[in-house]
Image: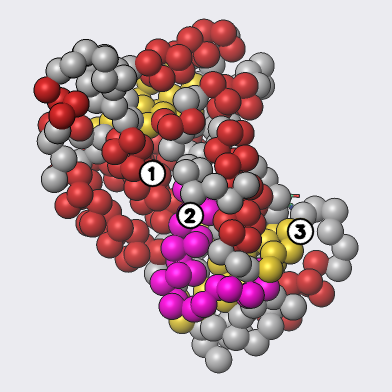
Amino acid sequence: MTAQILDGKKLAADVRAELAHKVAALSGDNVPVLAVVLVGDNEASRIYVRNKKKAAAEVGIVCEVFEMSDTIGEQALLAVIDELNENPHVSGIIVQLPLPAHINPLKILAAIRPQKDVDGFNPYNAGLLACREPQAVVSATPKGILRLLQSTGMNLAGKHVVVIGRSNIVGRPAAMLLLNHDCTVTITHSHTRNLPELTRQADIVVAACGCPKLVKKDWIKFGAVVIDVGINRLDGKLCGDVDFEQVKEIASYITPVPGGVGPMTVAMLLENTYEAALRQPTHECCHGHGHCGCHKHND
Ligand code: NAD
């Protein structure tokens, strides 16, 4: 068998095209605004932010980057978040990770107003997802993984998914989201014993461990679907957590790296921002509380 390639680049372009239409239909006041807080001078973070800004512009979402020195204190950063929370023009807020070591990321992420938390990293949204509450803002990478799986047309109910990795930003929320879609989910991590034995039982493998080409052909059941989240550099070239050349011989579907989950992550962030803008009260007069009595509330 040679696997069909799950083309995240193409699917993401379709999502962006549809979003561009939806954004164009919004009136000027309601155009989504994504605020990106970037602390310090991390080169990779700068590239990620640049890509997000470019993708946002393509769909008509305004992306404002707030650059902070890496010497900024926790309280000062919390004050920036608070200002963005209160700004009625800002639909979504993300804080580009990693943060400098002296700042507790959880404290910062928890300060983002849940309705504006378009990365879905606020523990409140993570909790809503764990409770299977539909109003949870689901983080972009897991959402992208789900969309890629759905694009195959397969019925997810009852499928055994093995997720490799349990991070708060990928493994854990991906496991929760797939559980909420009726999959049977096994979460594995760096202490898991006999990992290949587990992955061989999977109908779907989601590899998100940051180990270049860890997943080999003999780890995969014939016809399984393989989603590779990893972004690694090996001998100067990008590669995933899956040995693509080997595994494509046995899987039914596989995502490439680059061009799989990565572009979907950015597209889902934009979709989350659009959805946040729809939730966002835009009435400056009363911040959406409706006590000003202006005509906007009768729309
Ligand atoms: P992380 O380092 O926070 O977590 C890695 C997880 O993998 C941990 O839970 C760890 O226990 C587990 N792990 C590590 N080695 C393992 C092993 N040998 N066997 C089993 N489990 C193991 O990383 P992360 O932020 O979750 O990211 C994972 C990978 O996904 C990285 O390569 C990252 O660059 C990539 N990533 C890609 C996207 C995207 O949009 N494509 C988004 C986020 C992260």
Judging from the image, what secondary structure is the residue with disc 1 in?
Answer: helix
Disc nearer the start of the sequence (2/3):
2
Disc nearer the start of the sequence (1/2):
2
Q: Position of residue 1 (x, y in %)?
A: 55, 91
244 shown above or below 187: below
**Mark 1 belongs to which amino acid?**
Asn
Q: Residue at x 40, y 35 (%)?
A: 49
What is the crowding at mark 3: few (fewer than 14 residues within 10 Å), some, or many (at least 20)?
many
Looking at this view, is 175 or 75 the one in front? Answer: 175
Q: Pointer 2: what residue?
A: 143
Q: Pointer 1: what residue?
A: 272
Q: Residue at x 51, y 77 (%)?
A: 155
Q: Pointer 3: what residue?
A: 188
Distance between the alpha carbons at the discs numbered 1 and 2: 10 Å
Is residue 134 shown in magenta? no
Write down the region rendered in magenta: 138-161
